Amino acid sequence: MVTAVRDAIIAHGDAYDKAKILHRDISSGNILITETGGGLLIDWDLCKKLQDIYEGQGHVERTGTWQFMAARLLVIPTDGEGAAIPDRADDLESFLYVLVWIALRYTEHGFVNGALIDMLHAGFDHHYLDPHGAAKGGGRKKVEVHASDPFEVSRLFNVPLKELIKTLAKTFAVRYEEAPTTTEIAEYNVILQQQTASRTPLEKLLSEQLIAQNPFRKYMNRQDNLKGLGWMESELTKALERSGWNKHGDRVQRDLSTPPPTQPMAPKTEYSEGGTDPDPFR
């Protein structure tokens, strides 16, 4: 499964870099696993040329499959003027949610069915309508990517998979953090000046340590990771090279057909057409 997602990310990157196209509908149902274990990214019906997206040619609308859309796009529901313009990071964030959803739905873990249904619903299906009747959501996703145990993946029995999800979530969390304060930026600039003025090896070492721990520097490092070409592909490749994948690697079929009784399922709209794919391994 992780190999298939990694291959789909590569295809997504090629489309973006070479053809200047953004897929805009990353979901479990749009990643196929080949007979050899590789992956294919399919269903390009909602893709759009970058020029049309970023130069304002044509209508800007929210598209995708609700359960896997980036939290940012669910928080801002307005189509047209005021809409959040989709970007590459939104699609990459969707790949994270595909990994999490499949891990929770089809791998071995310590969730009982009731708790699992609640997690899947709250994290992926939940929505509410704003005063204008537009569906909003994504709040739980924003909380989970910031958590030390995102989506409670510590309950997964597959160690490389849960560590991969934690690593990816930590990178995407920066999208939803407040920007550093002017005070933190000023402190960082002072440390840089001190580093330049450092004369002894000890002074330089201390300056480097202060720079590494500065909130502004940490924030910018994670922003750089998010923008880096191939960073997510690289993280999946490194994870696949770790040992432990064969243990707890069998697919688990669960009956999760009963939704929580207190809340509706995700809206069936143009951006969540058909809901989640019942079988992401088709």
Image (cartoon, grey):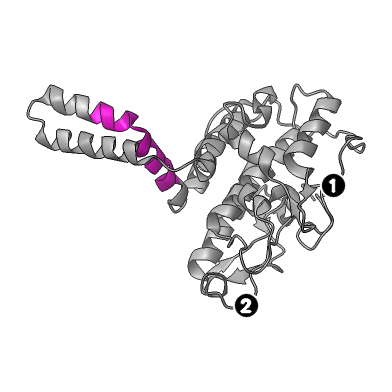
**Residue 224 colored in magenta in the image:** yes
| Mark pair 1, 2: CA separation | 33 Å
Of the pair 240 and 36, the residue shown nearer to us: 240
Q: Which numbered tag is attached to residue 278? A: 1
Q: Is residue 199 above or below residue 94?
A: above
> How would you rate the neighbour count of disc 1 (Cα within 10 Å): few for under 14, some for 14-19, many for 20 or more?
few
Span of residues in magenta: 208-225
Question: Where 86 sits versus 120, above or below?
Answer: below
Q: How many marks?
A: 2
The residue under label 2 is 58
- At x 70%, y 62%, the residue is 63
At horizontal 68% and vertical 38% (from top left) the residue drawn is 140
Q: Mark 1 or mark 2, which has the lower sequence index?
A: 2
Single out the residue that lies furthest toward the front.
Answer: 131
Q: Report whether 190 appears left or right of 84.
A: left
* Amino acid on which the number 1 mark rests in the picture: Pro
Place of residue 144 in the rendered image (x, y in percent of width and height, measured from the top left): 63, 34
Q: Quadrant of residue 195?
A: top left
Magenta highlight: main SS: helix
Towards the viewer: 166 or 213: 213
In depth, the one of 255 and 3 nearer the eye is: 255
User: Can residue 226 be seen in the rendering of this structure?
Assistant: yes
Q: Is 241 rendered above or below residue 264?
A: above
Left or right of 38 on screen, residue 123:
right
Q: In which quarter of the image is residue 149?
A: top right
Q: Residue 148 carries which label?
A: none
User: Callout 1: helix, strand or loop?
Assistant: loop
Q: Where is residue 229 in the image (x, y as percent from the top left)?
A: 44, 54
Q: Which amino acid does label 2 sit on?
A: Gly
Report crowding for label 2: few under 14, some 14 to 19, many 20 or more residues within 10 A (C-alpha): few
- Could you tell me which quadrant the N terminus lies in? top right
Dot 2 falls on a residue whose secondary structure is loop
